Amino acid sequence: VASRLTVLKLGGSVITDKTKEFTPSTETIARIMKEISTTEDESLIIVHGGGSYGHPLAKLYRLSNGHTNQTQILGFARTRQAMMDLNKIILDSAIENHLPCISVQPSAFIRTRNRRIEDIDLRIVSGLMDLHMIPVMFGDVVLDMQLGFSILSGDQLASRLAIELGAKRMILAADVDGVFDSDPKTNPKAYLMERMTTQDAEALIEREKQDDRGSDVTGRMMGKIKEMLAAVEKGIQVVVLNGCVPGRISNALTGRRTIGTVIER
Ligand code: IPE
């Protein structure tokens, strides 16, 4: 099972309207679930982000700082609840499309230490996959051994799952066409890199560090790439693509060429 595994991360910007709190992109979610259902015999794990469900609450209660005051405790609960609400919308759509998706809540089997995954118990997830079920996880609020709690991003989770379970491929669905040499949302001349090696990615990360504006020159893509690199180094192919455009996720799931960026060792 493991060598055929694909980990699909659905970015929060794809499955929600990031400009309006608690607004799912219902049609996009349905279309993506339909696309997945046409690619049957894959072994698949889905991880989704928080978008306008998780992030506003996490920010309001400053959860990324860790536990600093008691009002955050309700914030932790509310953020989890918002993620569960979004997760339910995704699961409803998956089941409607006859996908055997099972929600697995990350903080019940993962703890972090200073924001990085420290313990992860994959027995349940592996067992579900042995029965050809599709585990669905999400960026979550989790217990942190140093900070009390922290936010675990869907990107860190997806990358770690891909490594631990020996995935062949990880697909990162974002709201841009792939990795560009500059921010495609502000620079019309931004160039889409169709192929990248770990070296190319490291060079881009380095350029980012040198950038005195301290901004993310690639439009917030670098944080994601950093998370993915550990998986790329293990020989896992990473495909960054636009999940808002029909057909690209199903193309990537079936190993067909599609518009996007392929990152390989
Ligand atoms: C965020 O997950 C989860 C919470 C805020 C609890 P991600 O960081 O993976 O979400 P997106 O994809 O950026 O929206």
Image (cartoon, rainbow, N blue to C red):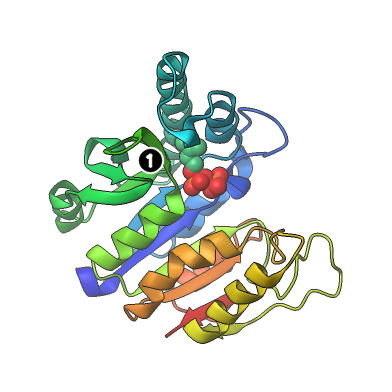
Residue at the image position 72 percent from the left and 65 percent from the top: 217
Three-letter residue code for mark 1 = Ile
As drawn, 99 above or below 16? below
As drawn, 170 above or below 54? below
Residue at the image position 72 percent from the left and 68 percent from the top: 211
Few, some or many residues within 10 Å of mark 1 (<14, 14–19, 20+): few
Considering depth in this image, is 225 or 207 the residue closer to the camera? 207
- Within 8 Å of ligand 1, the CB of disc 1? no
Q: Is residue 140 left or right of residue 216?
A: left
Residue 190 in which image quadrant: bottom right
Residue 90 point in image, percent of width and height? 46, 39
Q: Quadrant of the N terminus?
A: bottom left
Task: Check disc 1 and report the residue beneath it.
Answer: 95
Q: Is residue 130 left or right of residue 263?
A: left
Residue 178 in which image quadrant: bottom right
Residue 176 point in image, percent of width and height? 68, 62
Q: Is residue 261 left or right of residue 100?
A: right
Residue 104 in which image quadrant: top left
Residue at the image position 43 percent from the left and 59 percent from the top: 8
Residue 98 point in image, percent of width and height? 36, 46
Q: Is residue 181 left or right of residue 242?
A: right
Would you say residue 226 is visible in this rendering? yes
Considering depth in this image, is 14 or 38 the residue closer to the camera? 14
Considering depth in this image, is 99 or 176 the residue closer to the camera? 176
**Image mark count:** 1
Residue 110 point in image, percent of width and height? 25, 43
Tag 1 secondary structure: helix
Would you say residue 178 is visible in this rendering? no
Q: Quadrant of the C terminus?
A: bottom left
